[in-house]
Image: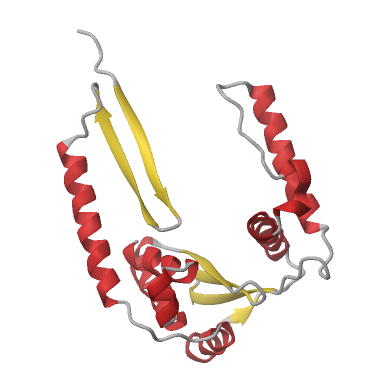
Amino acid sequence: MGKVASSVSIIGGADGPTSIFIAEKGGKVKLTTRIQNYFRKVKRNRIKKRITANPHTLEEVVQWLKREHGAVEVSRQSHSYLEQKQSLKASLIMRHRPDLLGELMNLEPPDGEDVEALKIFMEQIHERNRMAAEIADDIFPIDFHIYEIKWAENDRMRIGVETVWQVLDGSFSGEKKAMKQLRKLYKKIYLYYGVTAEDIENETERYKSLLGVLCS
């Protein structure tokens, strides 16, 4: 018996959860996938209706993290901080000042599975990040901080704050039993940062970030 051909398409990105459509031969999407995507859309629309304007500044967020959750700033000399700052700076430059990266701005991943071509591509990405990191602050300023919240011995959350370009992001890790609480706290932080009425009306990046976190 021959194998049934299938294909996978991934659609989505910055505006919220990614939708994955698994299509069988002929392009027909599986019923279970259509149902899952329907309920994702229903959940997303329900959450959108609940979002109201209640913004705080990043400075207020930092003070709240310290006061309510005992957040402590991570050393700006630590390897993890320097690595994350370099990655963020490269991302921000690509978004706001792509002209500073020249030919390295528009890198295309190689087709197929050519190991050597893939190696060259990765080296180009590292070179682009290095170039971005070396751009002087007077040309492209960045003010980045990481704040850590210790939940338990092996559970923690890190929140990145960049005040020039107004970026809030974060990550958390820990034991399975703590993950539910960490996820709730993560959403709580984004809700505290909040959005303005203008963010809601124009569906800005700040609004999309909040919606994406609440839908996760």
Judged from this view, the residue extending furthest toward the top is: 1
Residue 164 spot, x, y in % from top left: 67, 75
Q: Is residue 43 shown above or below 75?
A: above
Residue 129 spot, x, y in % from top left: 73, 50
Quadrant the C terminus occupies: bottom left
Nearer the observer, 147 or 189: 189
Residue at x 40% of width, y 86% of height: 54
Residue 203 spot, x, y in % from top left: 41, 68
Please give the count of numbered marks on the rendered protein.
0
- From the viewer's perspective, is 21 left or right of 10? left
Q: Is residue 55 shown above or below 91?
A: below
- From the viewer's perspective, is 1 left or right of 86? left
Residue at x 48% of width, y 71% of height: 206
Residue 121 spot, x, y in % from top left: 68, 33
- Asked whether residue 155 is in view, the answer is no
Q: Which of the 4 image quadrants contains residue 120? A: top right
- Asked whether residue 26 is in view, the answer is yes
Q: Is residue 147 shown above or below 4?
A: below
Nearer the observer, 154 or 80: 80
Nearer the observer, 106 or 37: 106
Residue at x 29% of width, y 38% of height: 21
Q: Which of the 4 image quadrants contains residue 81? A: bottom right
Nearer the observer, 58 or 157: 58
Q: Which of the 4 image quadrants contains residue 140? A: bottom right
Q: Is residue 124 shown above or below 142?
A: above
